[in-house]
Image: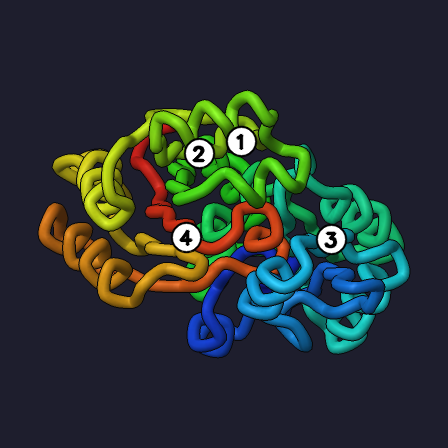
Amino acid sequence: MTEKILITSDSTTDLSPELLAQYQIPILPLTVTLNDIDHKDGLDITPEDIYRNYEENKSLPKTAAPNLADCTEFFRQYVEQGYHIVHFTISSEMSSSYQNSVIAAEEFEHVHVVDTRNLSTGGGLLALRATELAQRGMCAAMIAEECRRLVPHVDSSFVIDSLEFLHKGGRCSTLAMLGANVMKFKPCIIVKDGKMSVGKKYRGKFDAVLLQYVAERIGDGSDIDGSHIFITHGGCDPEIVNACAQTVRRQGNFTNVHITHTNCTVSSHCGPGTLGVLFLRKHPI
């Protein structure tokens, strides 16, 4: 009998409402606590709320993974409908979303949890691949196994205009922040092996830096799986976002170039003025 498969994700994969509807991917939201009020990421709070609050109060929200009860009830509603679930989470190095999901999944027979070892549309790429594998008739266990194999193929990076949010959130030292400000660096943050690290440090106007960064990451496109490429940003001017997308299209024969916004969890750490280009490579990196 053919399995009835559902691909699900926590709210960190940054897939647009249109893509979530097209691929029918339910979302388990993280909690964002702003001014002592709990919100559900993407449901009753937006990145713009976080940016505005920081401008007014110089305070950042706290984020929390879905707790065990949330994960259990999320899975239960679909298991009771007969689904075999493949669920994607933000890197286990960055959140307990994966751990809580794994514990909750133990209550059910057909729930497979995938640690994306990534964030934002780095995980979204794997979720989309999973839906396509399900459409081809692959069983849930094999989909999860194939997506885990693809984790090292995800090329995930972004450039930020200011280190202020990273510094305020304790992810960047004062010395590094001051050095970047004095030298006017725009650092490229690379996600690899489940963690964030600093790559190339760009200098110059942010718009020009973004175009240079995108062109360099794409290169000639020969090692890129062109089925889905994401330009994912927070608080960037639509004109430069579209210019970055056009740069991607010019440099390769890619099927889908998506533009999406960062979720509240990522936005609370990186702040406005953040843009990344994310895709799957044909070989591990």
Res 6 visible: no
| Residue 233 screen position, x and y as percent | 40, 56
Instruction: Name the residue carrying label 1.
Output: 196
The alpha-carbon separation of the residues under discs 2 and 1 comes to 6 Å
Query: Which of the two labelled residues, at mark 4 and mark 3, occupies the earlier sequence position?
Result: 3
The alpha-carbon separation of the residues under discs 4 and 1 comes to 18 Å
| Residue 216 screen position, x and y as percent | 20, 35
* 86 sits to left or right of 78: left
| Amino acid found under the numbered disc labelled 3 | Thr
Local SS, label 1: strand
Q: State which quadrant residue 158 falls in.
A: top left
Q: Could you say which is closer to the camera, residue 54 or residue 229? A: 54
Query: Which of the two labelled residues, at mark 2 and mark 3, occupies the earlier sequence position?
Result: 3
Local SS, label 3: strand
Instruction: Name the residue carrying label 3.
Output: 63
The alpha-carbon separation of the residues under discs 3 and 1 comes to 17 Å
Q: Could you say which is closer to the camera, residue 144 or residue 170? A: 170
Instruction: Name the residue carrying label 4.
Output: 273
Give the number of marks: 4
| Amino acid found under the numbered disc labelled 4 | Gly
Mark in front: 4 vs 3: 4
Res 94 visible: yes
Tell me, yes or no, whether the two marked residues, 2 and 1, touch with CB atoms within 8 Å.
yes
Mark in front: 4 vs 1: 4
Query: Which of the two labelled residues, at mark 2 and mark 1, occupies the earlier sequence position?
Result: 2
The residue positioned 48% from the left and 64% from the top of the image is: 15
Q: State which quadrant residue 80 falls in.
A: bottom right
The alpha-carbon separation of the residues under discs 2 and 3 comes to 20 Å
| Residue 187 screen position, x and y as percent | 39, 32
